Image (cartoon, rainbow, N blue to C red):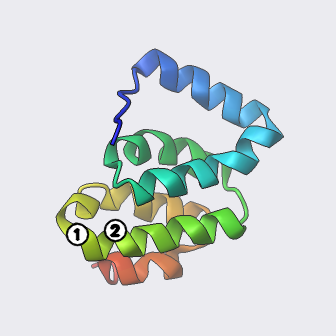
């Protein structure tokens, strides 16, 4: 698979674009679901915090993202564990914290 390295400047531009655009907000979770299917922890580590700040309401793309994470857990749990904090923070801000418990268990 192709991996894209995101630079700090690009993150700021992306963050602003996602916050300013309703269309971008609608597609970002589908994009992150694709990243999860590709086991792209770097993309999720960089983009999910931007999405968490938006506090988007859960929709079909959110459920697809969570489903992709559950598949990821079966395939390569150690790599998923490396982004646990990012995923937990997103889950609590977006109201889906209980849906990500199967990924990592209860927070101790």
Report which residue position mark 1 lands on: 77
Say if residue 58 shows up in the picture. no
Residue at point 35%, 48% (across, down): 40
Quadrant of the rendered image containing residue 75: bottom left
Secondary-structure class at tag 1? helix
What mark, if any, has residue 72 been given in the picture? 2
User: In the picture shown, does residue 56 fall above or below 27?
Assistant: below
Of all residues shown, which one is farthest toward the front? 1
Quadrant of the rendering where the C terminus is positioned:
bottom left
Q: Are the residues at dot 1 and dot 2 in contact (C-beta closer than 8 Å)?
A: yes
The picture places residue 85, in percent across and down from the top left corner, at: 34, 58
**Visible residue check, residue 42:** yes
Picture quadrant where residue 14 is located? top right
Q: Residue at x 63, y 46 (%)?
A: 28
Q: Total marks drawn? A: 2
Q: Position of residue 23 (x, y in %)?
A: 80, 41
Work out whether residue 4 or residue 57 is closer to the camera in this orientation and state it: 4
Measuring from the top left, give residue 100's x and y in whole percent.
Answer: 45, 76
Instruction: Report whether 84 appears left or right of 59.
Output: left
Local crowd size for mark 2, using a 10 Å CA cut-off: few (<14), some (14–19), many (≥20): many
Q: Which mark is residue 22?
A: none
3 to the left or right of 58: left
Give residue 90's position: percent from left, percent from top. 51, 58
Question: 97 or 65: which is nearer to us?
Answer: 65
User: Which callout, 1 or 2, points at the residue further toward the start of the chain?
Assistant: 2
Q: Residue at x 42, y 39 (%)?
A: 46
Residue at the far top: name it. Answer: 9
């Amino acid at each position: 698979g192709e991996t894209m390295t995101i630079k700090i400047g690009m993150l700021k531009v992306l963050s602003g674009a996602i916050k300013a655009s309703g269309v971008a907000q609608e597609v970002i979770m589908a994009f992150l679901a694709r990243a999860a299917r590709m086991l792209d922890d770097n993309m999720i580590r960089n983009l999910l915090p931007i999405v968490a700040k938006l506090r988007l309401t859960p929709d079909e793309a959110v459920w697809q993202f969570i489903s992709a994470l559950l598949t990821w857990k079966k395939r390569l749990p150690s790599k998923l564990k490396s982004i646990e904090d990012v995923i937990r923070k997103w889950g609590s801000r977006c109201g889906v914290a209980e849906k990500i418990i199967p990924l990592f268990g209860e927070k101790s």
